[in-house]
Image (cartoon, helix red, strand yellow):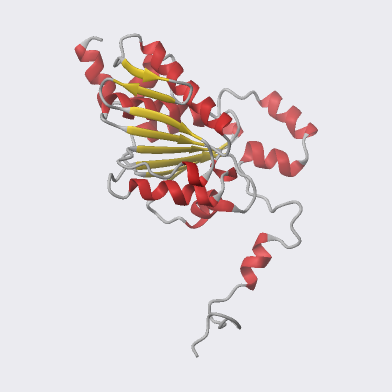
Amino acid sequence: MNLARDLALALDPVRLMQSLGHEPDRWQRDLLRSNADRMLLLCSRQAGKTTVAAILGLHTALYRPPALVLLASPALRQAQELFRALVGFYGRLGEAVPVEAESALRLELTNGSRIVALPGIEHTVRGYSGVSLVIIDEAARVDDALYDALAPALAVSRGRIILLSTPFGKRGVFHRLWTGGGPEWYRVKITATECPRIPAAFLEEQRRLMPRWVFEQEFECQFHDDQLAAFAFADVQAALSKDIEPLFGGGTP
């Protein structure tokens, strides 16, 4: 690879995305150039969240060696799809860092970087250390235990973590972090109407065909109450009080 071009790609992930034939949207540019260590991407279906996450993972592996990049999802199949996207981008670079070893779930480069796709099961993701980047796809659907197992792997390495998802109810770690995670989380919200690649006619068709709450969840990034829940999320939250002492287990003898 040409030294000047390689330096330009190393300094700017946006250039890497462009070199792979993808002109980033404004929000993708901002995200790729952000220095934030904690990111939440609340995006419509087909908005480009997986693409930009794969680009950021690849850039980390190529230009921040020796990097360990972990890809997780609710199911291994979903993590593999993200892994395939990343490996596909890597293959199109042509003159990238050579491969040391490769399998269906792992890519190891000669610069010492590793990219690993993980199943969405808490006890299978423990044991990793020195992690540079964690990417959790479909994060609204993962068990809280998965996030709780992966987050400590960043403690010493001070690595980055990105959670990307469409909404899936007012539940789980993704909803909790989006609504109350604090200012340290870099938040991006992109609805379908903000994505130039999704035709307005398609959205109107889906609006007619889908139940309203499904359309609002999938394309308008709205968190809805569980349709089978006996009580609304807001009512449950309103009923909670820190001023009332628990009847059992929380009092002072």
Q: Position of residue 234 (x, y in %)?
A: 65, 63
Note whether residue 87 is visible: yes
Left or right? Give the position of 210 relative to 94: right
- Residue 183 lies, with reference to residue 121, above or below; the image says below
Which quarter of the figure is the N terminus placed in?
A: top left
Q: Position of residue 119 (x, y in %)?
A: 52, 36
Displayed quadrant of residue 36: top left
Going 37% across and 32% down the picture, which residue do you hit? 32
Residue placed most toward the observer, 196 or 125: 125
Going 50% across and 27% down the picture, which residue do you hit? 82
- Residue 101 lies, with reference to residue 38, above or below; the image says above
Q: Position of residue 204 (x, y in %)?
A: 73, 29
Name the outermost residue toward the left.
3
Going 59% across and 81% down the picture, which residue do you hit? 248
Left or right? Give the position of 20 relative to 47: left
Q: Position of residue 231 (x, y in %)?
A: 73, 63
Left or right? Give the position of 5 relative to 200: left
